[in-house]
Amino acid sequence: MNPYLFGYLGAAILALSALSLTRKNPVHAVLYMIVMFFHLAVLYLGLGAEFLAAVQIIVYAGAILVLFLFVIMVLNIKEEMEGERFSGGWPFGIAIASGLFLLVVLITGNIVPGQQGPYTPGVIAAQTNTKLVGTLLYTQYIFPFEIASLILLVAVVGAIVLAKKKLR
Amino acid sequence: MFRTQVMVILPEVLLAVSAMAILLLDLVIKRKSVFALLTCAAAAFAFFAVTGAQGAAWGGMFIADGYSSFFKAIFLISLVLPAASSAGYLDVERAGHGEYYALMLFATTGMMVMASAGDLITVYLGLELMSLSLYVLAGFMRGSTRSNEAALKYFLLGSFASALLLFGISLTYGLTGSTEIGAVASYIMSHGLSGNPALAFATILYVAAFGFKIAAVPFHMWAPDVYEGSPTPVTAFMSVGPKAAGFAVIGRVLMLALGPMTFEWTGLIIALSILSMVAGNILAIAQTNIKRMLAYSSIAHAGYVLLGIAAGGAEGLASAMSYLFIYAFMNIGAFTVVTLLTTEGVNAEDLEEYSGLSKTHPLLAALMLIFMFSLTGIPPTAGFAGKFYLFSTVINAGYLWLAVIAVLMSVVSAFFYLRVVMYMYMREPGHREHRMERSFGARLALGITALAVLALGLMPAGLIDLARSAAANFKG
């Protein structure tokens, strides 16, 4: 991946996330988030993960954020914009987050890549990323895949339980 | 090949299928107490399947061995007893739903996957399956603001803990090129990575994420509010099962995958253990709500069990496991008493409600007395046997000072446990009459827990031998 492109994408993702966090208007916050997700998709594409890039656009930028916008339409935006964006504890939160960030920066020098598995970039390019992900998901990783399907079922049941209209 | 693999995960399949069956049957069956029975039956079948299922499946992603079987027994106990006592409670709180039992079954499936995880991906997915079900169960009483607050708090903090866990897993994968627990350990060994700061950071992230699940200080903030706000049988369920599941993955991830770094993480575990014992026991003194008090007590108990992990090796793990087994009975027993006293319009959570219970319900008061003695660690109850084995293991491992702190804190804990006894036996009944909910399931659960606490207190040898053979593979 071109280092300049990577630099641009990284900086843009950081800036857009910060913008989406600090906006008072929830609609603006969500729109910044959509743009951020598009940048993230390009980042995945640059790393040779086409499948992940497509899923990022379809699921996150498409489905989830449209859902967000629907929820926001139900909220009273005027009321939302009058209050403070952050609660009183934000300096404390920033201190912890920057401490964690500093730690991550300090350890990056110590990351030595581990052993390479059978799926090198060459193998992936030959078989295409999407096909390989599909094959592995339904063979080697079938057990985690099935657990993930149970998690989705619990999410659906949970949403119905918590949002059902009447108790009896 | 496929058939043998399914046999290995048969207990999990049984629970997941019964959960889905209950979701469907909820549409046709009108008598909701049937579901409590179905849940217990499913757990009983799963228990027999656990004893039969041994071996590894899916290329080592799922391992059913003696270690996982011991934990699965704890999970099934912590499923059956609260489920049996839920029927009456749900009627009182007007929240009888098939979904309730289905979610309990799904949460237990998640715990069992965690205990059997041979791969970090399985650890994460099992943890999410368990947590997601618990978030919904915590907020199950939608009419109550406390229940809503509990669910929201648990969900937000729990997602944060999951994110930390994922970050730790991704660092481990980057450094070792594998997510398989055995492969991670051997790669760290062969490449001398145990002093690597990035891996040390990953270790801290693991400890934080698992510390959250077992509610150890300083990752305990959620516990008192969530325990107080959740429906009481759910609190009983989540004070035991998820905690044991957290310890099961601590064994798999810290002791096996990060086994070469034992020296590094033992210090963290000792710090967490001391903080949990001190903060949990001292903060519990100030509580007047019995569910909050038991929440702080469960934080303190997480601290005791962490001592076993800190002592390390098969023996340390065995003492932690047998203590968790005993803790399951005494803690669920105490919560079941609270459940039984919850009747129409009375929530039986304030300590004052227990004044003079010995005069109005002598048997119930006597059982509560047994549970409180056991939680304190007074012979001849199981709590004493568990603590005795745990503390002597810690001393044998060379941490005499740690055992001294633990004993001192147990003495402190006597204050708030015995205060409940004092209210029951030395105060006159208050203006309000105690009423007991007429639920057969809850009474049965109470009888079983009380018997188990006494029997394990008098004859702990069998349990300790079982725990020892289950932990034998962990050399540490």
Image (cartoon, coloured by chain):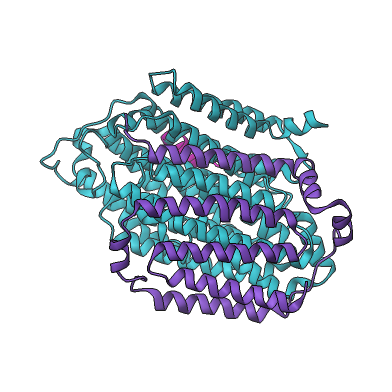
Chain colours: A purple, B cyan
B333 and B17: which one is in front? B17
Question: What secondary structure is the stretch in magenta mostly built from?
Answer: helix
Quadrant of the frame with the N terminus of chain A:
bottom right
Q: Position of residue B89 (x, y in %)?
A: 33, 33
Q: Dividing the picture into quarters, in which one does residue B27 lie?
A: top left
Query: Does residue B325 lie above or below B474 as drawn?
Result: above
- Magenta range is B450-462
Quadrant of the frame with the C terminus of chain A:
top left
B408 and B88: which one is in front? B88
Q: Residue at x 61, y 46 (%)?
A: B126
Q: Locate residue B23 relative to residue A142 in the image: left or right.
A: left
Q: Locate residue A83 relative to residue B192 in the image: left or right.
A: left
Q: Position of residue A77 (x, y in %)?
A: 33, 60
Q: Residue at x 79, y 53 (%)?
A: A129
Q: Is residue B307 visible?
A: no
B377 and B208: which one is in front? B208
Q: Residue furthest left?
A: B431
Query: Does residue B246 lie above or below A138 as drawn?
Result: below
